[in-house]
Image (tube, coloured by chain):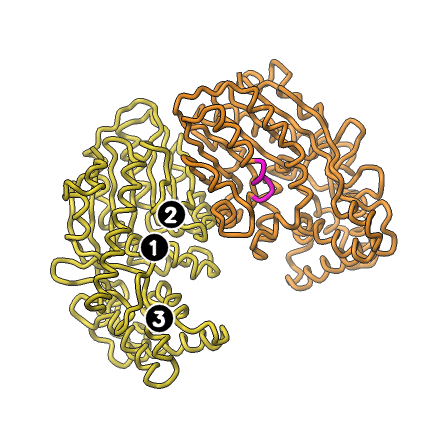
Chain colours: A orange, B yellow
Amino acid sequence: MSAAATTARDIAMKGGGYYSKATGGAKDVIDGATTMVLDAIADMEIADNGAIFTMSDMGCADGGTSMAMVGKALAAIRAKAPSRPLQMVYTDLPRNDFSQVFCNVHGLSDAKSYIDDFENLFVMASGTSFHKRIFPAGTLNLGFSATASHYISDRPCNITNHVHMVGAEGAERAAYTEQGRKDWESMLSNRAADMASGARLCLFNFGIDEEGRYLGHTGGVSMFDTFSLLWQRLVDEGAVTNEEFAATNFPQHYRTVAEFKAPLIDEANPVHQAGLRLSHAETRVVRCPYAAAFEEHRDAGRFAHEYIPTLRSWSESTFFSGLSEERPVEERQNIVDRFYDSYETMVRESPEGHAMDYVHCYMVIRKV
Amino acid sequence: MSAAATTARDIAMKGGGYYSKATGGAKDVIDGATTMVLDAIADMEIADNGAIFTMSDMGCADGGTSMAMVGKALAAIRAKAPSRPLQMVYTDLPRNDFSQVFCNVHGLSDAKSYIDDFENLFVMASGTSFHKRIFPAGTLNLGFSATASHYISDRPCNITNHVHMVGAEGAERAAYTEQGRKDWESMLSNRAADMASGARLCLFNFGIDEEGRYLGHTGGVSMFDTFSLLWQRLVDEGAVTNEEFAATNFPQHYRTVAEFKAPLIDEANPVHQAGLRLSHAETRVVRCPYAAAFEEHRDAGRFAHEYIPTLRSWSESTFFSGLSEERPVEERQNIVDRFYDSYETMVRESPEGHAMDYVHCYMVIRKV
């Protein structure tokens, strides 16, 4: 359901913090918005009453991308309320590599951890979906989630002419929007029940900004259109069937800012009625680190070689699972290899404009 | 540090609940003593006050062996105090396969889980060693741990004439006993701080009973003596060096009943001073399921074929890591294969008396 979980599952076998290394840009997104988390903490009333203070990273993957932010956030909370035990809970879907989370946090990997910076800190994990209740009622004090809520819990239909809802039209587009709406309200409603009065949520999610930009679609070559184009080319070449093309759909919905805000400002919405209020919302574009590096080194071969693996790390499972299960696994893998090879060739031969720029909607939400 | 962690790490790659399947006997131990846990719950005052009730399985491995017991325990707690949210926390070392824990609990494996039997239940995991604090002070209500505390946090010395402390003598034996004493007090002291007043610990651990029996040493062929004999035979045959034999030591201490009880009944001991008291202690022998099956089927080849893998699942890492790192990995693996082949041959040719009977000391401890 979360990007994190799906990605971690796909590449868990590579181990050793591979996810964090392959997602430097995702860490940039969190690092760049850490002040938003610290401002939210500064804005909270945190009584120095000795009660447990629970923070959570929901959709944490291996915990690497948020590690620096979490350390700073815990320090800020501790400074405001030194008597309170800190409980840091990492959540993701059950198949996530939670051992890697604990190895990273407990200093058994090359990730730099905050674990030795705090006394009276207790690190836990939960394998419960954020579409369910994760915490006992009223016990979550600070919830964080980055780049996870665009995954939808169910694909409502195939997308005929594209591989992602950003290219879908008409009833198909509407079906994804509706699934995205339901999942967003479900996630927020469950958090409203988890949260203490006065608690905050800091949610940094993929979305569509006020100028229509979204991940990999910021004015240059559109990444999802390229995915669709090259997958269609395999259909034209007879390697992939029309049925397989139709069955290849990212299980994602990129929400507009209005969609993100709706349940928090509509007074009739169950999320609003449960006490969640919007404190802050903004969009940002964070530059693709591989495209930024290319602007310096100007080596198209190197760019293509470094850029495609980061796309592949989170997209491969979608293309693989679009292929018929009647094909032997090795045949499916060969088709997917050919697909990413064609993308790498395209970037090497014509590198300008390719970029997986991140477009996020950053929200801070409070519970009254 | 825990048997669970070590075993789970060793065989994590086999996945799919392999640990639980390979350890039917360990499940028998827990199932057979579930009434002891239920009696402890019956004996507790559990105010129906809506506060979170936290239960934990410490050294949980994949959670499979305790699943049925945990479901019954949670039901008993819920019946006594229906208003209290239940928090079930699985702990083990960071490298444990926590994804398998969550898959088992959340019904994504063939393990039968209690997850759908309870509302207001929250399942968490912790990768914190039980030689450290795991829970905020005074928040653990019912701690459980089975077949984990015999692992010691550090090997104090090599054992010259044997591979396990049960065969050690003199100063070597004393060094293991001392390490076992320190670790037992450390584990109990940390739990004393974790526990609420009136909380209980149910600890079922490998030990040496009043008749001198211990795991695989209950009157027939002694398992650890056989390990030592066959490993020495590889020295005699030139396959293993004397230095490697000396470096092959299980990082374990099997405590006597007196050693288990000491910190709880000695009023000067920090554990006693922290408020832990012994409510109940007994020893039991649980029959090796493979030897029991052999008594029925009388097929020595089948017995040997089924019996050796269960020994190997938790002992292999000790023999492998005793071998010099100057040997290529494949060479070390070949020596270990030859070792277990020799054990299987011995059992096939002379099956009588071989049995990995479990000998546990069962303790219920309360915090005043």
Instruction: Work out whether B126 lies above or below A365.
Output: below
**Residue picked out by circle 3:** B247
Label 2, residues with CA under 10 Å away: few <14, some 14-19, many ≥20: some
On whether disc 2 and disc 3 are found on a single subunit, the reply is yes
Q: Quick one: SS at disc 3?
A: helix
Identify residue type, mark 3: Ala
| Stretch of the chain drawn in magenta | A64-69
Q: Is residue A84 left or right of residue A5?
A: left
Asked whether the residues under the numbered discs 1 and 2 touch, taking CB atoms below 8 Å apart as contact, a structural biologist would say yes
Instruction: Tell me where residue B280 sits by quadrant.
Output: top left
Instruction: Tell me where residue B243 sits by quadrant.
Output: bottom left
**Residue picked out by circle 1:** B153
Where does the image place residue A292, in percent across and percent down from the top left?
78, 45
Q: Is residue A66 magenta?
A: yes
Asked whether the residues under the numbered discs 2 and 3 touch, taking CB atoms below 8 Å apart as contact, a structural biologist would say no
Residue A293, visible in the rendered structure: yes
At x 12%, y 58%, the residue is B210
Instruction: Tell me where residue A344 sits by quadrant.
Output: bottom right
Q: CA distance from mark 2 to mark 3?
A: 25 Å
Q: Quick one: SS at disc 2?
A: loop
At x 25%, y 60%, the residue is B176
Q: CA distance from mark 1 to mark 2?
A: 10 Å
Identify residue type, mark 2: Ser
Label 1 or label 2, whichever comes before in sequence order: 2
Q: Chain of mark 2?
A: B
Asked whether the residues under the numbered discs 1 and 3 touch, taking CB atoms below 8 Å apart as contact, a structural biologist would say no
**Residue picked out by circle 2:** B129
Q: Chain of mark 3?
A: B
Of tags 1 and 2, the one toward the viewer is 1
